[in-house]
Image (cartoon, rainbow, N blue to C red):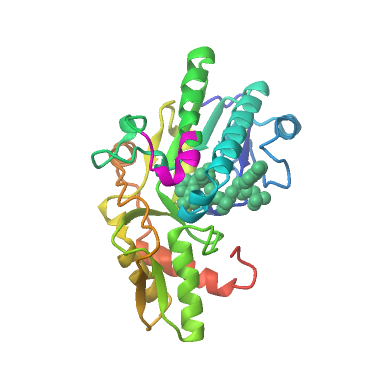
Amino acid sequence: QGNQTRPWKVLVTGGTGLVGMGLQRALKEAGGAKEGEEWIFLSSKDADLTKFEETIAVFRKHQPTHVIHLAAMVGGLFMNLRRNLDFWRRNIHINDNVLTAAHEVGVTKVVSCLSTCIFPDKTTYPIDESMIHNGPPHDSNFGYAFAKRMVIVHNKAYFNQYGGCYTSVIPTNVFGPHDNFSFEDGHVLSGLIHKTYLAKRDNTDVVVWGTGTPKRQFIYNLDLGRLFLWALKEYDEVEPIILCGGDECEVSIKAAAEAVAKASDFKGQLVYDTSKSDGQFKKTASSAKLFRYLPDFKFTPFDQALKETCDWFAANFESVRK
Ligand code: NDP
């Protein structure tokens, strides 16, 4: 990369969501845009990226040199179970439109955001970057997962044909301020934060969906934002890289529910509704590649990040997505 002759104009798709807001915070913390750098954060109001005409129009308007591609139709387990077709079609269109438009306006680097949900369901653990295509993803979210996997195909083919660095990163479950806190459509941690807030307010129990035994790895959106800044500037492989912390970032849903209760100062009961689906039992991803590049990267401790998120949720209860 390192092409400093032309000023950097970084276009961030999906710049207003959970990951985009983490990136905005990380950029601010790093001192904002550097000299000769401009950042533009897009939301769906700027362009509907499922439509190519709107996508190319917004790329022609801004003429980016670099793209961080975050925009996607995103949802938790239960939304995926109901809408696999929509997840497949919308995401395949968004990704193809963004990568095609980037090429048309001469973008030199794209970092697209994938997810550990794309990994094979039946596999050995930990999963690393070489195992992504070794079997179908979990059936609950196959539409989303296959659409995301195709970004890797696109990037590789793009490199073979044109030689550019269109790459991707694979974060684990993201949480933090600006998440979608809906029970039906959101992710596990944001749902738990919302439920716990209400249970504390109304003096009721917290009902956790599933048995509580599945394990997940979590990454704070601020840490992910910092890692996106690194990937944009330093990571030059076309092949994806998993972004997650060490062993301590993997916790059971039960442990997560208990941590949310502690962070929210909730003293009531946690009960488990075992009639609800558990989803994949675990999907432990390996952070070995990341730590080879960044051996000294410090992730925010889970309890601290959770406390910041619960406090943010309580302070913004009226206006949060829920
Ligand atoms: P959010 O739902 O919080 O944000 C999604 C963003 O994409 C918003 O800025 C939204 O704009 C935009 N967007 C959605 N649809 C369109 C569209 N049709 N056209 C233009 N923009 C659109 O999601 P996250 O921040 O959580 O997700 C960002 C990326 O991170 C995604 O690629 C996701 O797959 C990935 N990811 C997320 C994880 C998680 O746990 N949340 C885990 C791993 C990966 P608007 O605000 O206007 O709606």
Residue at the image point whose x is 36% and y is 81% from the top: 269
Image check: 247 left or right of 209?
A: left
How far across and how far down the image is residue 169, in percent?
44, 37
In the image, 6 versus 273, the foreground residue is: 273
Which region of the structure is painted magenta? 136-146
How far across and how far down the image is residue 72, in percent?
57, 43
In the image, 228 versus 113, the foreground residue is: 113
Q: Is residue 301 above or below residue 5?
A: below
Residue farthest toward the bottom in the current orientation of the protein: 203
Say whether residue 263 is visible: no
Q: Is 142 inside the magenta-drawn segment?
A: yes
Residue at the image point whose x is 69% and y is 46% from the top: 44
Q: Quick one: quadrant of the C terminus?
A: bottom right
Residue farthest toward the front in the current orientation of the protein: 275
Image check: 20 left or right of 47?
A: left
Q: Is 39 inside the magenta-drawn segment?
A: no
Say whether residue 136 is visible: yes
Residue at the image point whose x is 67% and y is 38% from the top: 49
- Quadrant in the rendering for residue 117: top left
In the image, 74 versus 229, the foreground residue is: 74
How far across and how far down the image is residue 314, in percent?
54, 74
In the image, 122 versus 242, the foreground residue is: 122
Q: Is residue 258 above or below residue 120?
A: below
Residue farthest toward the left in the current orientation of the protein: 124
Image check: 321 left or right of 206?
A: right
